[in-house]
Amino acid sequence: MNKEPQLSASTWLASILVTCFILLVFQKILWLVVPVLLALVLYYCLRPLVQALVLRGLRHRAAAIVVASLLFFATVLLMVFFLPVAAARASGWREATVHYLQGGLDFLAKSELLLVEKLPVLRGSPLLKPPPMKVDTIIEQFGEKYLGALLLQIVHWLPSLLLMPYLTYFFLRDGNRLKKHLIRSVPNAYFEKTMLLFDRIDNSLQSFFVGLIKLTFLDTVSLALGLWMFGVSGPLVLGLIAAVLAWLPYVGSALGCILVVLVTSADFPDQPAITYGCILLFLGVRILDDFIFLPLTIGRSLHIHPVLSVLMLFLGAAVAGPTGLLLVLPVLGVVTVVTDILGQILTDRCLRERFLLARQLKSSR
Amino acid sequence: MKSPFHLFKIAPDDQRISELRAMILFKELTPRELREVEQLLHERTYQKDEIIFAEGDVGLGLFIVVEGRVRASSSLPAFKNISAEFCCGDFFGELSMFDESPRTARVTAIEPAQVVALFRAEFFSLLERDRGIAAKILFEISRTVCRRSRRALLGEKDLPIL
């Protein structure tokens, strides 16, 4: 139904520059950007539910209240069930971290031995030297240096994260009204083009956010299923963490893989074959993700060439660090749509003449 | 005191819903369906002589006259001998609901006019969500288009298909 226009080089250049600027701004107000983005994800996921309730006879506001209340109760229930478990486990965080890190290091040492057996040339290589410190010393130093700062960061972020359900409720309740008000303020001459702009932005964001949630679900299920078959502990949590980490392009996948290796090698210290199996499983899920799940969910909704995507990821990371890496593609997708339509509006002489005529008519009365 | 359960009852028609119901395009819709459609409509106010859309513009939606009158004019020979003044309740630009081809006429307000616009992309999202409502609206569009084309073939005066 929607034919995507071919964009000119100047439009792309303008989009890239604007994207970099937005990422810089986002980095400065991250405390606001994160809850707004999460609220947008929830808004796009819950909007069909509100629409379904409206079709069943509820007023829009009532439907928004019902859905937001359901979200609130679901969050409370999750916290009631999981916080005690998390608190109980948090007390043993040091032992658990040492256990998993030690497992990972042992696995590395065994792999090195195996490698040296197969390739004696590598014997004495500086790459294969053991780590200089013991794991519990590293953990202790980390705890002394960073744990306090980490806890402070969590306390700092908590109020802004509490904004998320509040924002979601208002997006659900007033999102459409806000859109209508914005469109109402647009001069008549530009009305239809502005409608097109809003529709494309809405579609891009919806495809991206809903696609991201579906992708996370599919990744979690496939990885959890595989890990469960290998007998790894906590497969669902591990699968979910790895799938959420994969939101960070490239770096996230690497971190997810390291996490899987740490847990598997700690669970099966004497069976490195299982760890190798889990690494293969992880790679298999990433391939499934790239070639099957991604086209099925997010797909080509953002209409960005793969080469440009990779370049933008580097640029995003250089401009705004991990925030830039995470946000660069959706921001570029939206900015491209806005730049394209604004370009069409500003360069259309007929529309400008129509706008000037309307202004003349207004001033003459 | 209001019952806390009023949230779950079908709310009574407000003035806006009654206005929509009076429009030929929405006459078959129930109040709750009208509430859903109301979310998709955009009100615009035009001054006398202001252009609503021009011939050759890419059509993105249809317009319904709520108040005032608008006139369609075109360079196409087929528009001769056709009455082209739309008043309260009439709709125009209906062809853009089906494709993105350029508008066949220019429509101008001949007196201060208020119109509501139904945008094609939003209508398609409604079509995906609730085929029942969309089918009723599409049926009314088709019926009006049929009537207008039949009368045009018979040489009788009616509004043009835009």
Image (spheres, coloured by chain):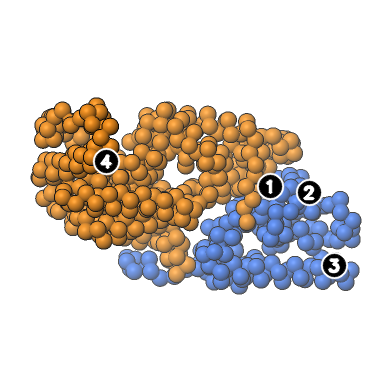
- Residue highlighted by disc 2: B55
Tell me residue A172's x, y (percent).
Answer: 42, 53
From the viewer's perspective, is residue A16 above or below residue B43?
A: above
| Image disc number at residue B46 | 1
Task: Give the residue type at disc 1.
Answer: Tyr
The Cα–Cα distance between marks 3 and 4, rounded to whole angstroms, is 88 Å
| Spatial CA span between label 4 and label 1 | 82 Å
- Same subunit, labels 3 and 4: the answer reads no
x and y percentages locating residue A105 in the rendered image? 18, 39
Residue neighbourhood size for the residue with mark 3, other residues' Cα within 10 Å, grouped as few (<14), some (14–19), many (≥20): some
For disc 3, the marked residue is B152
**How far separated are the C-alphas under marks 2 and 3?**
20 Å
Q: What is the letter of the blue chain?
A: B
The answer to whether residue A102 is left or right of residue A306 is left
Q: What kind of residue is marked 4?
A: Lys
A222 or A320, which lies in front?
Answer: A222
Q: Nearer the viewer, mark 2 or mark 4?
A: 4
Between marks 2 and 1 in the image, the one whose residue lies nearer the viewer: 2
Quadrant where the C terminus of chain A lies?
Answer: top right
Q: Chain of mark 1?
A: B
Say what secondary structure mark 3 lies in: helix
Label placed on residue A118: 4
Chain letter for the residue marked with disc 3 in the picture:
B
